[in-house]
Image (cartoon, rainbow, N blue to C red):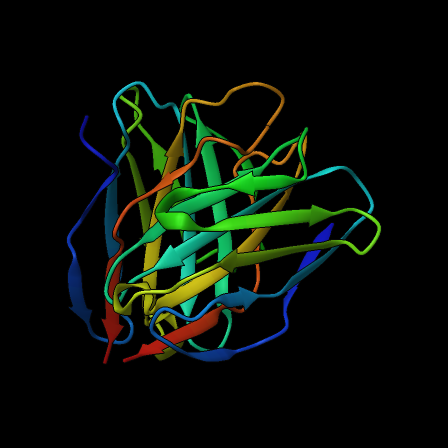
Amino acid sequence: AQSVTQLDSQVPVFEEAPVELRCNYSSSVSVYLFWYVQYPNQGLQLLLKYLSGSTLVKGINGFEAEFNKSQTSFHLRKPSVHISDTAEYFCAVSGATDSWGKFQFGAGTQVVVTP
Amino acid sequence: KAGVTQTPRYLIKTRGQQVTLSCSPISGHRSVSWYQQTPGQGLQFLFEYFSETQRNKGNFPGRFSGRQFSNSRSEMNVSTLELGDSALYLCASSSSRDRGRNYGYTFGSGTRLTVV
């Protein structure tokens, strides 16, 4: 079984400032890791994913994340945020095999970007 | 390429009634998963279907059920609705069929169910 902890429930940030959203996970098996974004009244949109290989993963809209196996972390970063990045962000984990559609999601981090 | 389509977008039901939600996956996707999202419990996995067979199931009571048709469209049903069933229900689809590897799921916009 896997679990995910998002360390911040809300992150306020000024426009054009950098942001980091923290995610830690636990698992007894190899995992895939994901970050999703949810805008109000919408579904989940995939930002990026780590399956294997390079630990620095680049996603859409200028986001990137780094997989750290020793610290079991997968933190999301953006060097300069826009007002349109205001949304809720979810870190998710699944086992690398035999997961059959099941993701374990974190509780979410609400990002509020102000001018 | 059309995305995952969920219908209806909004639904209001009375406690004790039953409800059926529909999900049309991306063309060619044969795996469909369902999630419940609430402010208190967050995103929770309900079940997953592939080729009309349920392959995985979360920890929900038997009032929650689903099925998948031969064209991969899926429905979920909740019987004897309770106030706590009020939630956003999300469907996701994937073409992935290789040993349950979850790396190709696309989510729909969800059905917002309100139980009164």
**Is residue B80 in view from this perspective?**
no
What is the x, y in percent for residue B54? 49, 33
Q: Is residue A10 left or right of residue B80?
A: right
Which residue is at a point 48% across and 43% down the rendered structure image? A48
Q: Quadrant of residue B14?
A: bottom left
Which residue is at a point 27% across and 31% down the rendered structure image? B73
- The mark total stands at 0
Which residue is at a point 57% across and 63% down the rendered structure image? A106
Say above or below: A10 vs A17.
Answer: below
Q: In this view, does B58 lie to the left or right of A85?
A: right
Which residue is at a point 83% across and 46% down the rendered structure image? A28
Q: In this view, does B22 lie to the left or right of A53?
A: left
What is the x, y in percent for residue B81? 33, 69
Q: Quadrant of the N terminus of chain B?
A: top left
**Is residue B46 in view from this perspective?**
yes
What is the x, y in percent for residue A115? 27, 80
Q: Nearer the viewer, residue B31 or A58?
A: A58
Say above or below: B110 vs A109.
Answer: above
Q: Nearer the viewer, residue B68 or A53?
A: A53
